[in-house]
Structures are given as C-alpha cells and as structure tokens.
Image (cartoon, rainbow, N blue to C red):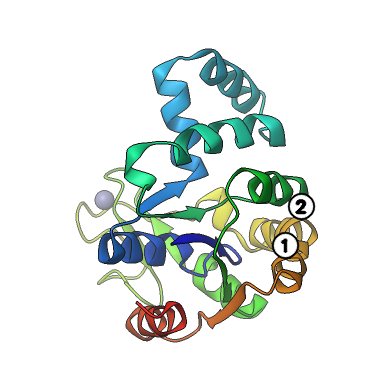
Amino acid sequence: MKLIFLGPPGAGKGTMAKRLASHGGMAHISTGDLFREAVAQGTDLGKQVKSILDRGDLVPDEVTVKLVQERIGRPDCRRGFILDGFPRTIPQAEALDRLSPPDLAVNFVLADDEVVKRLSGRRLCPSCGKTFHILFVPPRKPDICDGCGTGLVIRKDDQVEAIRNRLAVYKAQTEPLEAHYRDLGILRNIDAAPDPEKVFAALKTALGV
Ligand SMILES: [Zn+2]
C-alpha cells in the first residue's frame, strides 16, 4: 500500500507512520530524514540540499521530488511506503501522481487550539536534552529537569507565536492537498484528538489492515 500522511504539526503523523510501517511492513519515509541522509552522504544533490538548508531556505520542489523518487525506488518500498512530510505543495503532489500515485491520503485532523496546546506545552532540558510536557509528561517539580535539576526551556519553535506561524504556513501550503486528494477520491480523515491507541485503531480500520 502506498500512503500519504497529511495533518498539522503536533497531530502525531510521525508516530503513527512509524507504528503503521512496522505493523504493515512498509517503509516509513520522512522528508526530514531524506534531507539529513542526503547531506550526510555528500552526493551532488546532498551538497545542494546542505547549502539551501544552511541559508535557511526551503528545499525547492524539484530537489525534494528527486530525493523522494530515488527513495521510493529502493527495495524496502516494494511492499509499499508511508510518506510523512511529502507532498507539501500541489506541484509536489502532481509530481508524485506521475511517479507513483498513492493509494490513499490519510488526513490527521486536529483543531488549531489543540495543536497549540500540544506544542506549547513541550519543555526541554538545555543541559541533558530530556523532554517534558506540562500536561502529558510533567516534571516532578515545575520547570525543573527530573534528571539533572536544570531549569527547563521552551524551544523557539514551540513558542505560541511560532506555532501559530507554522499553522498558517501549513494551511496556506498544504490544505489545498486535501482538496486534491478528495477530488481523486482517496482522502481519508482520521480524528487525531483521542489518545494514540484510539487513533492507531481508527487508522487500521480506515485502511483495512
Ligand atoms: Zn536535564
């Protein structure tokens, strides 16, 4: 089965992709991993990606598509794959339709306020790297690391303004993909608000696996 996972940051796409991939024997492909791998291998494409990322720019569609094309041609994709973080734009979706059309696009639906609640509660220990969540994984003492006693911090990406920003980018760029896959008749919505066990069960039901 060839799957695409859509949904806002914080909806748990990555976690679900990992679980489903090991459940169904499919390859889990995240574009973040692909970029890191290309940079680490130092191929021509990797060098290109590195200089783009170093400038803080977005990797252009044609570069991302090339990396995905190479990745989905590998043997571990013969039983299918889950694309997590791709396509992100309509041109990317159209390129994928030409290369290897997906069977289903799973859309993890989560309200904006819930996204903000999930992401803004994250806390990081700047000393030992341990992560917490004020609602879901609270430290024993407020804002203090259980492991080493250092004061916890909020990553820049997890501050409310940054989260609202990421959501706005997501809506502008990626929500048109919902319409694209709805028109193709392959969009499946999954409510991402319940706990992960329930979301995973709903996902398996929706896919019939
Ligand atoms: Zn610590």
Q: Position of residue 15 (x, y in %)?
A: 38, 63
Can you tell which mark lies on residue 165? none
Q: Quadrant of residue 160?
A: bottom right
Q: Residue at x 53, y 81 (%)?
A: 190
Visible residue check, residue 143: no
Instruction: Tell me which amino acid carries mark 2.
Output: Ile
Question: Ligand 1 closer than 8 Å to the CB at disc 2?
Answer: no
Q: Position of residue 39 (x, y in %)?
A: 47, 22
Label 1, label 2: how many angstroms apart (C-alpha)?
6 Å
Instruction: Tell me which amino acid carries mark 1.
Output: Leu
Viewer-side residue, 129 vs 207:
207
Q: Residue at x 69, y 63 (%)?
A: 167
Q: Position of residue 140 (x, y in %)?
A: 25, 72
Question: Label 2: few (<14), some or many (≥20) within 10 Å?
Answer: some
Q: Quadrant of the C terminus?
A: bottom left
Identify the secondary structure beneath mark 1: helix
The answer to whether mark 1 and mark 2 are in CB contact below 8 A is: yes
Viewer-side residue, 161 vs 185:
185
Residue for badge 1: 177
Q: Quadrant of the N terminus?
A: bottom left
Residue for badge 2: 90
Identify the secondary structure beneath mark 2: helix
Instruction: Indicate left or right for 200 with 147 as reference.
Output: right
Instruction: Indicate left or right for 46 with 178 as reference.
Output: left
